[in-house]
Amino acid sequence: MIELIPAIDIIDGHCVRLTKGDYDQKTVYGDPLEMARQFEAIGYKRLHVVDLDGAKSKHIVNDEVLRRITSQTSLIVDFGGGIKTDDDLKKAFDAGASMVTIGSIAVSNPELFEKWLNQYGPERIILGADVRNGYISINGWKEDSKEELLPFLKRYVAMGVKNVLCTEISKDGTLSGPATLLYKEVMAVYPNLYLIASGGVSSMDDIKALNAAGIPSVVFGKAIYEGKINLKELWDWQNESSPA
C-alpha cells in the first residue's frame, strides 16, 4: 500500500504552493503548524516540509517553523530546501527533522552528499531528484543541470541511497496528474528503491493509480489546499485497503 505524505511548502513563515516551482505563481494558504495539526488529527503520521525561502537563498531560512511543527505535533517530518552545508544539515536535525531531502548538493558536491549519507545513514538522507525535460534541476528549480535522471540515480543507488523523492517539475502544482510513466520507469530499473512520487496529484484517483503502479509513496499538497482531495476519505481508503 502506497504511503501518503501531505506536503507543506513555506515562504515567509506561511504555508504556500507554487506552480511549476515559479515563485511568481504563489498562493498562500495559512499557518503551517495549523495545517500540520489538521493532518495529524486525521491520522497521518508523516509530513514533507519544504523551505522555499531556503531553496532560493541556498541556506535554511525557516528552521523555526520546522521546530514549531516538530515540537507541537508527533508527525515524522522530512525536510528539504537550502541544505548546503554541515551547519544547515545540523540545523535541520536540531529543529526536529527525522529525515532530510537533499538534491542540489548531490549534483554540485557528490563527495559532501556521500559524507552525509555515511554519517547519518540512508534512512535519514533522502535523495532529491527534481526533473525537468529529463534532467535534474537544482537550487530551487532555478537551474537545470546536465545530469540525466537514471544515470544520476544509478550513481547514488550504488552509493547506498534507499530513499528518493522524485518531482516532475512540469507537473508540480498544476493538478494535471502525476508523471506515473516516469515513476514506473524508475521502479522498473530500481525495484528495491523507496521512491516518493511528487508533482501533479489532483485527486484520489491519481493516488490510486500510483498505488496500482506499485509506487511506494506519494507527496501531495495543492490538491489538499484546493479541496480536490478529502484527507479523511483518503486516509480511510488507505486503511481499508491495507492488509490486516
Image (tube, rainbow, N blue to C red):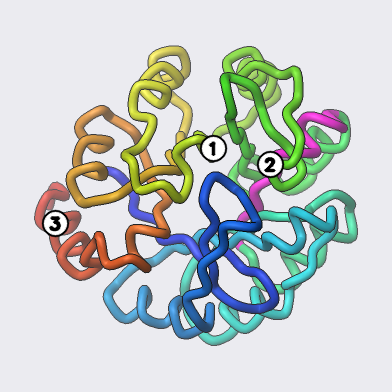
Which quadrant, please, contains the N terminus? top left
The residue located at (60%, 35%) in the rendering is 130
The residue located at (70%, 55%) in the rendering is 81
Q: Which mark is residue 237?
A: 3
Residue range corresponding to the magenta coloring: 98-110
Which mark is nearer the camera, 1 or 3? 1
Q: Secondary structure at mark 1?
A: loop
Give the mark, 2 or 3, whose residue is nearer the N terminus: 2
Q: Residues within 10 Å of mark 2 (few under 14, many from 20)?
A: some
Q: Secondary structure at mark 2?
A: loop
The residue located at (50%, 35%) in the rendering is 170
Residue type marked 3:
Trp
Q: Which mark is residue 213?
A: none
Q: Which residue is mark 1?
A: 169
As drawn, 243 above or below 113: below
Q: CA distance from mark 2 to mark 3?
A: 33 Å
